[in-house]
Amino acid sequence: MPRDELKQPLRQRRLAQRLWERRPRALTVAYIALIAGFSGGGYWLVQQPHPFAGEPQITLAVPPVEEIKTASIDPAPTPEPPVLEEVATAKPAAKIVEPVQQQNYQQDATIYVSTKQPLTKAPISGATEASAAGPLPRITPQGRKPSDLYARPVPVGLIHSEAPKIVIILGGMGLDEKLTAKAAKNLPGDISFAFAPYGENLQAQVDKARANGHEVLLQVPLEPVGYPATNPGPKTLLADAPEAANAEALQWHMSRFTGYTGVINYMGGRFLSSAPAIKPLLAELRKRGVLFMEDGSLPLSATDGVAKSMQMQVRRADSVVDLDANPISIQAALNLLEEQAKTNGIAIGTGTGLPTTIDAIADWAKSAPDRGVVIMPASAAFKGRLG
């Protein structure tokens, strides 16, 4: 049916035409779609769980597993000893081994450790016996002796080495507390100390000395020639005294402190010349597991003969290094001691803890290793080939 133009108002159009003319442009549609996409995508992301949100993540490429070949865990094969070239050339199929003599150089090898290494703190309960006089040394129920338990350890290889060995024992320690502390600090721990039983704070002084590595002996006063005009001190053991009296006096001395490996005489010219007086003394020391050392100040002594009859080991010092307290004389005496050690393998010297003696021995000890001399504690003189 033809459209009636006259009946249609001026520029009036139908609804469809008007809507088409008002349609959105393509760019607008794209913007709307983009915004909607971002909005919808953001909302979806917010709703998703993120267990590692905020944690750094690294992605690594893991190579495929490969078989790793390691070295054999079997013991290394023992290398074949060298073959004598002359013999190997003549007979290729045979191998003649030249023996390797290791003992020669091992004997001269020495391992030095700190000379101030502290010794086991005294008293050791199993090696101590309570008495009316005080604590006394004793052999433990397991058979261990105080002479071993309180000794400064020495490697067996060093005892059996060919190096000249010297034992130095300084007596009179404990009577002057400051001087004893100086000796403990300035002297190497291989130097042994003999404490008199009359000092004050003896156990504390002994503990300090042992903490500095010094082995300790007990000085026991024995009757000298000319007693009582020459008197070593209270409770001196007398050559003609009843055995019980000497035993009581000995126990009093032995109870003054703990931690000693042995006993050394103080004076005793008359006592040590009497075999009947010596025997009970040595028997008591053997029963309690402590050593006996003579200080070398006496020209004659019956100790060796009595000890041999008892099958007991004792030692005697070779010389007193400070009979003349002049530093030059002490140095000469120490040099002589070295010569004796080179001849006999070991030499034992004693002295008194006086300032000049302490200083002279400290100077001598510094250079002793350079001369191949080994300083050892007193107990080492009773061990191995040295005993």
Image (cartoon, rainbow, N blue to C red):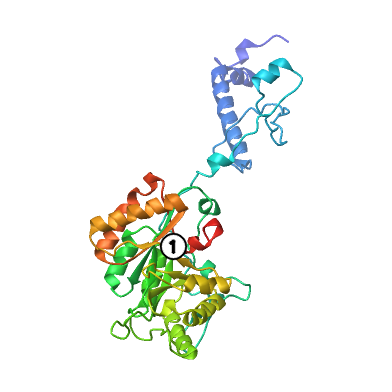
Three-letter code, disc 1? Pro
Q: Is residue 362 above or below residue 67?
A: below
Q: Residue furthest top?
A: 2
User: In the rendered view, does 168 fall on the left or right side of 11?
Assistant: left
Left or right: where 50 falls relative to 208 = right
Apparent side of residue 260 relative to residue 298 in the rendered image (left or right): right
Q: Is residue 331 at all visible to an observer of this figure?
A: yes
Decide if residue 260 is in sight here: no
Q: In the orientation shown, which residue stands out farthest toward the right?
A: 93
Q: Nearer the viewer, residue 335 or 146?
A: 335
* Residue at 41% across, 84% down: 237
Q: What is the quadrant of residue 10 in the picture?
A: top right
Q: Picture coordinates of residue 225 (x, y %)?
A: 34, 80
| Residue 261 vertical position relative to residue 346 in the rendered view, above or below | below
Q: Secondary structure at mark 1?
A: loop
Across and down, in percent, residue 382 comes to 51, 63
**Percent of width and height locating residue 24:** 57, 21
> Residue at coordinates 46% horizontally, 53% vertically from top-left?
344
Residue denoted by label 1: 118
